[in-house]
Amino acid sequence: MARKPKKVREQQPQATDETRIDQRDPGAGRAVGIKDIAKALGISIGTVDRAIHSRGGINAITKERVLKMAKTLDYKPNLAARY
């Protein structure tokens, strides 16, 4: 019995930071959080947290991208979540 040929996945073009912003669902009036920034950039929540709170351990370019995206999405820290 002959094997079926494997299906070849079509590669999708890489999204830039700007195209990821357009794809983001703000959640019907919900405030932007670090999860939203992480999802928009395709990085972990921990990396976003380190960049925003200047904890170190991440690349300077990544930190710059995170802070730029935070400003673009109008991120404001949730003070109730801090404590």
Image (cartoon, grey):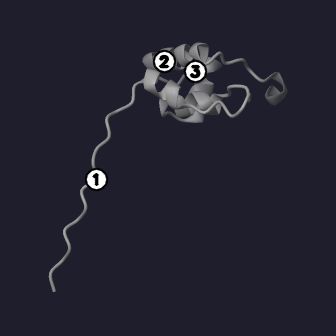
Residue 16: image location, x then y, percent: 40, 25
Label at residue 27: none
Label at residue 9: 1
Left or right: 64 in relation to 70: left
Quadrant containing the N terminus is bottom left
Q: CA distance from mark 2 to mark 1?
A: 30 Å
Residue type, numbered disc 1: Arg
Label at residue 51: 3
Nearer to us: label 1 or label 3: 1
Residue type, numbered disc 3: Ala
**Quick one: which residue is furthest to the front in this view?**
28
Task: Residue at 71%, 32% (x, y): give it.
Answer: 28
Residue 8 sits in quarter: bottom left
Question: Callout 2: helix, strand or loop?
Answer: helix
Residue 36: image location, x then y, percent: 61, 31
- 20 vs 53, nearest the viewer: 20
Residue 61 sits in quarter: top left
- Residue 34 lies, with reference to residue 12, above or below; the image says above
